[in-house]
Amino acid sequence: MRLIESKTEMWQACSASSRPLGLVPTMGSLHPGHMALVERARTECATVAATIFVNPTQFGPNEDLDSYPRTLERDLSMLEQAGVDLVFTPSSAEIYPRGFNTWVDVLGSAQGIEGLYRPGHFRGVATVVAKLLNIARPDRAYFGQKDGNQTAVIRQLARDLDMMTEIVVIPTVREPSGLAYSSRNAYLDPYQRAAADVIYRALAHASTLYASGQRHAATITDEVRNMINSEPLVNGIDYVSITDAESMNEVEWVERAAMLAVAVHIGGTRLIDNIVLGQE
């Protein structure tokens, strides 16, 4: 496994690699969700590259940039064992050199519910993903459905800017309890982690409602909200929202594939999750 810190070296290494080349962008603190992306890339691509970069531009002023988990040595060991060929670990100065002042704003999907609660977040995501795709020029790039609004943003980015990279989205990977794997789960103490299981239970309940014929979005979201609020350690819900799976516009009736997404605060930790209703 080759470890690379320079943009130029990464571009050269990817250009010289066997194709197809798959890219797995991460912010590190790897968990089974990340490794499922790597495993999928390994099955489909001759060369697999990963990036580890805690992107400062996607964090708001009161968010957890400074405390975000950083476990580089462990992450590199996991990637090597999984057969990754190239790992790009740039510094912030390498990605955003002095004088950097160009940003990518993806409209439409970036105005989805998560974008409303985290102004500027998707501008940072879209900009860094555009840079990583330009540096590596992968044939495929792999992302997880857990960040559902983000995947819509990235798909639109790649499509609108003719990035010539296939965006592959794989299903959310969950702990045995149903809790979606997330680097931020590390913030939870044992009691909070147990309480967080209510998120998936509520989403599963919504899926049951849909399967029984319920199509009214407000009815479904009200039941999900009530179920989550029944957990005493939940100290806030940013949103429970059903949106069109592509446009991220909220819907009144679930008439085609729609994403039910939630953002829940447990202790000082904000957790997001989603399921897709009506997916064939």
Image (cartoon, rainbow, N blue to C red):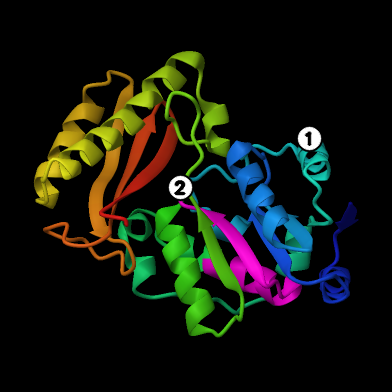
User: Does residue 121 sit above or below 172 in this rendering?
Assistant: below
| C-alpha span from label 1 to label 2 | 23 Å
Between 113 and 163, which is closer to the camera in this rendering?
163
Amino acid type at image mark 1: Arg
Any part of residue 98 in sight: no
User: Does residue 136 sit above or below 39 in this rendering?
Assistant: below
Q: Position of residue 71 (x, y in %)?
A: 74, 36
Left or right for 65, reference 218: right
User: Does residue 118 sit above or below 212 in this rendering?
Assistant: below
Badge 1: residue crowd in 10 Å (few <14, some 14–19, many ≥20): few
Between 77 and 213, which is closer to the camera in this rendering?
213
Q: Are marks 1 and 2 in contact (CB under 8 Å)?
A: no
Amino acid type at image mark 2: Lys
Element type at marker 2? loop
Q: Would you name the residue on which mark 2 appears?
A: 146
Which quarter of the image is occupied by the C terminus?
bottom left
Badge 2: residue crowd in 10 Å (few <14, some 14–19, many ≥20): many
Q: Position of residue 217 (x, y in %)?
A: 14, 51
Q: Position of residue 257 (x, y in %)?
A: 27, 60
Left or right for 63, reference 68: left
Q: Is residue 23 magenta?
A: no
User: Does residue 184 sit above or below 245 in this rendering?
Assistant: above
Q: Would you name the residue on which mark 1 appears?
A: 74
Between 102 and 211, which is closer to the camera in this rendering?
211
Q: Which residues are magenta?
A: 126-146
Left or right for 2, reference 233: right
Where residue 138 sits, quadrant-wise, is bottom right
